[in-house]
Amino acid sequence: MKRSIGTAVFGFALVAITATAQDMMRHVDLSSPDMVSAELTRGEVEATVAAATIAAPADFTGKRLSGLDLSGINLSGAIFRAARLNKTKLAGAKLDRAILDQAWLLEADLTGASLRSANLFASQMARARLDGADLSQARIAADLTGASLVGASIAEANLGADMRNQSMGLMRAVLKSAKLERLNARGADLSRVDLEFAVLKGSDLTGASLKGAQLGGADLTGITVVDTDFEGADLDTARLIAPIGLDRARNFGKAKNRDRLIRQ
């Protein structure tokens, strides 16, 4: 009975996604056992993975896995839809092609983890640590407010808004105040992504799309923007100091608030 109640409450929280887009934390008690405890041990997680097959991947849908140490485990292709992994240690773990849609990873440690081609749709990842992580070609429409992705890769990843699915609101990546120094964002879709006050010092955005992105107050010092598309990007009070390849960027003249840029 206890488990069914928790599932019902969490189901209500997921329904709230459609009503409030990515602002759903106000609907959930983040200190409740449902959000901070684990119902499986590391050994049980490893056993589930060992028994998985390509046809029947490890499935942790809705499971409570918060606070576990799952560092270094190969969880490639596993399903974590709506799972709770708050403050879970996943440093060095392999999560390639994993499904983490609507999962909770608040303050999770994914340092050096591999999430190539993973799905992170409507995931809650505020203050998560992804330094050195590889999210190449991943689909990321997650809330990463205050997260750290120093030296990480989102090369060819899709973080942009899905304009065909507006019934759920503007689902896109949110990276407000995120630490993104030396980020590899080559070829990434960052259209309409919220990067307000993010720090992107020394990041490589070669060939990336910043169409309609919110960059107000962001630190863009030393970024590489060769073939980067700035159409409609809001640069209000952003710090654009010593950029590399700005003369080869696309549609920089169509960016918003260029007159409010901080150049020195």
Image (spheres, grey):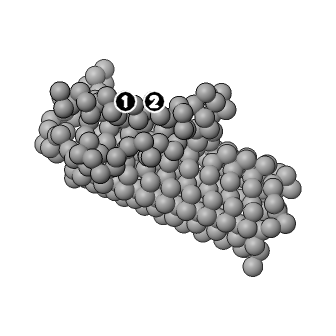
Residue that protrudes farthest toward the bottom in the picture: 264
At 56% from the left edge and 46% from the top edge, which residue is drawn?
Answer: 173
* Residue 79, image x, y percentages: 33, 32
197 relative position to 113: left or right: right
Is label 2 in a helix, a strand or a loop?
helix
Determine which residue is flagged by label 1.
11
Location of residue 157 with respect to 234 vertically, above or below: above
Residue that protrudes farthest toward the top in the picture: 55
At 51% from the left edge and 64% from the top edge, which residue is drawn?
Answer: 179
Residue 24 visible (yes or no): yes
Residue 119 visible (yes or no): no
At 80% from the left edge and 67% from the top edge, which residue is drawn?
Answer: 260
The image quadrant of residue 262 is bottom right
At 75% from the left edge and 63% from the top edge, which residue is drawn?
Answer: 236
Determine which residue is flagged by label 2.
15
Q: Which one is in front, 94 or 214? A: 214
